[in-house]
Image (spheres, coloured by chain):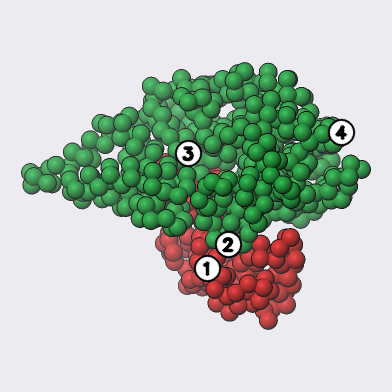
Chain colours: A red, B green
Amino acid sequence: MLPSELEQKLLEHANYFPRSEQAILLCLHEVQEYYGNIPPFALERVAQILGVPLNHVENVVSFYDMFDRGEPARHRIRVCVSVVCNLMNKQRLLDAIKKHLGIGVGEVTKDGRFKLIAVQCLGACSEAPVFMVDNDTYKFESEEKLYEVLSKYT
Amino acid sequence: MRSYPNILNIYAETTLNLLLKRAKKPKVHTIEDYLKDGGYQALEKALNMSPEEIIDWVDKSQLRGRGGAGFPTGKKWKFAVQNPAPRYLICNADESEPGTFKDRILIERDPHLLIEGMIISAYAIGANQAFIYIRGEYPAGYYVLLDAIEEAKAKGFLGKNILGSGFDLEIYVARGAGAYICGEESALIESLEGKRGFPRIKPPYPVQYGLFGRPTVVNNVETLCNIPLIVGMGWEEYRYIGPSDYPGPKLFPVSGKVKKPGVYELPMNTTLREVVYKYAGGTLGNKKVKAVFSGALDCFSAEELDTPMDYSPFGFGGTGTVIVLTEEDDIVKACLDIAEFYAHESCGQCTPCRVGTHEQAYLLKKLIEGDATPKDWEGLQFVNKYIQPTSICGLGAVAGRLIRQTMQKFPEEWERYVGKIKEVAYGTS
């Protein structure tokens, strides 16, 4: 059993769709939001709840990019590195993050607060360069604004 | 009402006031806003028509799919209803192509237009269960849709016996998790079944063998948002919007080096030049346009700015995505971004695409860094062509297309890098 708060949400997802196995991505999003990554023990429970074999869950987790089995972090910063953000100089954004948090792509701050991830197009290209912190989407306007945004995530 | 994740204030403008009638304003429009504007009246009208009649109207409207392929929507529906029930309707909201952010604002700002379109479409094709598959990177849109569906249920527009018609419909919202390939309709279906997003070999097409093996219609967000317009005004009037061969409103997400990036709703007889100069305000610093990328699909040169924004063979086509590059930008380096996008997003199922897209990006990077040998350049050109006919799905088929077009249209840009190869090869540098 997982913590009851998480367990509750997983069961809700499992009952949402016509077939329980359809809820696998919703469940995995929930697990990642709770732990800051996808821990192996959670996969077994997801498999039980959805009534599918563990190897099926493994097969799915390893396919989708948003699921992270590396080092956990409380918040993930996703920086778009696609063509438009690159034309609009996404490097300034990466440099500002490096300067403020001391992390490069794929790294986690020492206090486990942030992880920096490079991603493909986030679909807000008129605002490029664009980044997300957890579920929130932001435009990179200036270093000051960036630090202000990041300070909201503790 | 819950508070939504941070939503960006994307600029939107319309000359037609149809798809963006409400969504031009950056706010989440509730069902009250929508009803005040005449919302759900098209649904009432539709439920008094026969499903066959609605399909006929959509067919006569000449609506084409807005997700990129431009397939006639009415034809797709006609194929689906030839196959026995139960059938399913899926809304493809997995918008993930670079430069594309048009469906996002429809979902985040005017979810009831989409929901009304889905209810009418489901009624027309005889589906009692419908799904919206929204990309994982649009969490705000996901929650907006969940709330809007609850609102619609509370008013009797969804659920059992909708408005006393005897028609039942449930709409479920599924989230993706960062896989571009799930925008390919058969991969989307696999993902919605709870599996890896591997495209299926077609035929059979989803209208024959779709979700759980049942006939399934997969339509893009913008396509479905056109349905209430067609039913509301009638197909004859709809045909008067824009050019007679390609009627209806179209959304164009414009980004890159322009003064006013954003989403523009325009008729399809608009030219690319008008989109860039008249609507998006021209280029940053008034630099010369070098190229326009239509997402990661096609490349148009400055000489081709009079291209019409329609689905004709020489039209702009695709999702309508406009990415503007100016004389300051390096085409070959932009091609590397495109190559890396395809390498990253290849699902890995078939070998030509899995290996080919990575090989393409690797060799291109080598060329840009000045490390390429003549063999590498030969290899790049070979792999670029080879992925297309040998891959299972559309991703592999187009993974080399934009890059190949730039080689034809901007030979001097490529020569700057290819020139370096010869120097190295002959030891004269």
**Which amino acid type is marked by label 3?**
Gly
Q: Which chain carries label 1?
A: A
Which percent across, then down, holds residue B158?
A: 83, 47
Is disc 2 in the same subunit as disc 4? yes
Most distant residue in the right direction: B164
Q: Which chain carries label 3?
A: B
Quick check: can you spot residue B138? no
Q: What element carries label 2?
A: loop
Question: How far apart are the alpha carbons under marks 2 and 4?
Answer: 39 Å
Would residue B400 be found to the left or right of residue A15 on screen?
A: left
Residue annotated with mark 2: B195
The label number, if any, that marks residue B48 in the structure image: 4
Question: How far apart are the alpha carbons under marks 2 and 1?
Answer: 8 Å
Q: Which chain carries label 2?
A: B
Identified at 82% across, 34% down, the residue is B50
**Pointers 2 and 1 in contact (C-beta within 8 Å):** yes
Packing grade of label 4 (10 A; few <14, some 14-19, many >=20) is few
Residue annotated with mark 1: A59
| Front: mark 4 or 3 | 4
